[in-house]
Amino acid sequence: MELSTSVLGSTTVDKLKETASGAVLHVGKDKLTRHDLAGVECFNFHAARRLGHILTDVIGVKSLKHVYDAIPPAALAVPQLGVFSLAVLGAAFESKGLGTLESYVRKHQSNGANLVTFHTLKHREQAEIAREKAEKKKRARARNDTT
């Protein structure tokens, strides 16, 4: 794409060039650019930014290899991380030569367990959290009713 400084201004052109060449996915020490992700046909850069934020700032992973080797898919069933971000994670694994998203899930799967979609996995995790919350509330009411 030709960026005209006479039409757009030099500041805008510089910012667009920086955005195009800068890393869009930061996971610990790993940084992937739009070009890296596009190389494995991944173009959802908003999901990539969100994924990087959650993995690095919320979960605290060190690298994509750390995610692939040590973080089970169930640990990724957190708010604001959905199936599109998970697809970006698979693309990042492929870009770094670690494997595919399916190989990652199978690696962390219990022997004999059926493979389930991330949506199902996330739904189960949310249901478990809601169940624990309801039980805690019930126990608190029971303590308060003993007067």
Image (cartoon, helix red, strand yellow):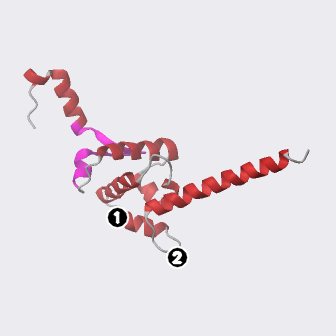
Q: What residue type is labelled 1?
A: Thr
How many callouts does the rendering have?
A: 2
In the rendered image, which quarter is residue 91 located in?
A: bottom left
Q: Which amino acid does label 2 sit on?
A: Asn
Provide residue 67's location: percent of width, then percent of height.
45, 55
Q: Residues within 10 Å of mark 1 (few under 14, many from 20)?
A: some
Q: Dot 2 lies on which element?
A: loop
Residue 142 in view (yes/no): yes
Alpha-carbon distance for marks 1 and 2?
A: 19 Å
Residue at the extreme right: 147
Provide residue 115's location: percent of width, then percent of height.
45, 71
- Residue 100 has which mark? 1
Provide residue 146's location: percent of width, then percent of height.
89, 48
Residue 72 in view (yes/no): no
Magenta highlight on residue 125: no
Say which of 96 and 135 sits in front: 135
Q: Which residue is drawn at 35% across and 61% down?
A: 98
Q: Is residue 18 placed above or below 10 in the rendered structure? A: below
Query: Which region shows up in magenta?
Result: 20-39
Q: Residue at x 44, y 49 (%)?
A: 81
Q: Name the residue under label 2.
A: 111
Say which of 77 and 138 sits in front: 138
Say which of 23 and 136 sits in front: 136
Magenta highlight on residue 28: yes
Q: Which residue is drawn at 48% across and 60% down?
A: 73
